[in-house]
Amino acid sequence: MDQTTTVEGDNLPFLKTTDIQVDCWLIINGYIVDFTGFGYGHPGGPSWLNEYKHRDASEKFNYFHKSDYAKQKMKGMAIGRVQLEEDKAIL
């Protein structure tokens, strides 16, 4: 993983989803978020996370999570940013 390519304002690397080495991750608003071990800590339970495992869950996240707390918690669990290629995420 290339740690030198980062997003301005954070120190997260751009990653291809094929480079992710954690079990339960979601893409939320361009962030790759590691939810491994968080399932039962999620207020909606683990089923929601499993439904979107390894996929873009931005629309659902934004619909249900309006608070700054949820957005900051998500960013705190982020392990990278989605690497883009020609304006499309590499999934």
Image (spheres, grey):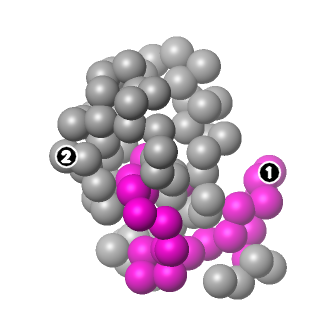
Rendering quarter of residue 23: bottom left
Circle 2 crowding by C-alpha within 10 Å: few under 14, some 14–19, many from 20: few
Callout 1: few (<14), some (14-19), or many (20+) C-alpha neighbours within 10 Å? Answer: few
Q: In the depicted view, which residue is nearer to us: 30 or 45?
A: 45
Q: Is residue 40 above or below residue 83?
A: above
Q: Is mark 2 on a helix, strand or loop?
A: helix
Give the percent coordinates (x, y) of residue 76. 66, 41
Q: Which residue is drawn at 60% across and 31% down?
A: 73
Query: Where residue 61 sits: x, y (%)?
Result: 36, 33
Say which residue label 1 marks.
Answer: 9
Snapshot quadrant of residue 88? bottom left
Could you tell me the amino acid type at mark 1?
Answer: Gly
Q: Write the residue at 42% across / 82% down.
A: 18
Q: Which amino acid does label 2 sit on?
A: Glu
Residue at (30% x, 23% y) in the render: 44
In the rendered view, would you say 68 is above or below 30?
Answer: above
Res. 27 visible in picture = no
Of pointers 2 and 1, the one earlier in the residue sequence = 1
The quarter of the picture where the N terminus appears is bottom right
Query: Image check: 82 left or right of 3?
Result: left
Q: Please name the predominant secondary structure of the magenta segment in the image.
A: loop
**Over which residues does the magenta segment extend?**
5-31
